Amino acid sequence: MSGPRKRCTNCGTDIPHAAKICQECKTVQPSNLLLVGVVVFGLFCLLFGVPIALFSVGLGRLIGALFAVCGLAMVFGGYTAYIDRKAGIEV
Ligand SMILES: [Zn+2]
């Protein structure tokens, strides 16, 4: 028994941190990589959305603002989910 452990997101069984699937209930464990992807994609949307919103008019501005808001939501959502998961591992 070595290495960090985590709890199954479905049944709460203690499983190896690197495990992709729970040994008990066979639930696929969500990976942090997915969250990182969401945050990166959110940053991408922010990066494009803000300038588009600032420098275009009419529909372009609306679309840019929409991108920026969605990006912000993804960055915050992904980041807080990541923090929650890290906290969950440590408990
Ligand atoms: Zn399980």
Image (spheres, rainbow, N blue to C red):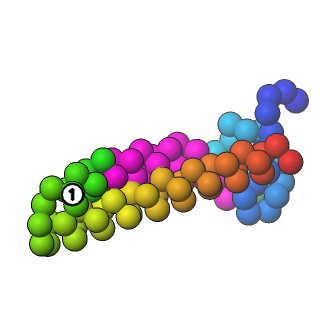
Quadrant into which the N terminus falls: top right
Q: Quadrant of residue 8?
A: bottom right
Q: Position of residue 81 (x, y in %)?
A: 62, 55
- Residue 90 in the figure: left or right of residue 17: right
Region in magenta: 25-46
Above or below, 21 against 59 in this view is above
Taking the magenta stretch, the answer to whether it contains residue 37 is: yes
Above or below, 11 against 13 in this view is below
Query: Is residue 26 shown to the viewer in this render?
Result: no
Farthest residue, direction top: 2
State ligand 1's quadrant.
bottom right
- Residue 64 in the figure: left or right of residue 43: left
Above or below, 80 against 70 in this view is above
Amino acid at pointer 1 = Leu
| Element class at badge 1 | helix
Q: Position of residue 87 (x, y in %)?
A: 76, 48
Query: Is residue 33 shown to the viewer in this render?
Result: yes
Q: Give the residue drawn at x 28%, y 54%.
A: 50
Q: Quadrant of residue 27?
A: bottom right
| Other residues around mark 1 within 10 Å, as few (<14) / some (14–19) / many (≥20) | few
Could you say which is closer to the camera, residue 88 or residue 61? 61
Q: Look at the magenta stretch and give its main secondary structure.
A: helix
Q: Give the residue drawn at x 53%, y 49%.
A: 35
Q: Give the residue drawn at x 46%, y 49%.
A: 39
Taking the magenta stretch, the answer to whether it contains residue 33 is: yes
Q: Position of residue 21 (x, y in %)?
A: 66, 49
Q: Is the C-beta of the residue carrying label 1 under 8 Å from the nearest atom of ligand 1?
A: no
Q: Give the residue drawn at x 39%, y 57%.
A: 71
Identify residue for label 1.
54
Q: Position of residue 42 (x, y in %)?
A: 40, 52
- Residue 81 in the figure: left or right of residue 14: left
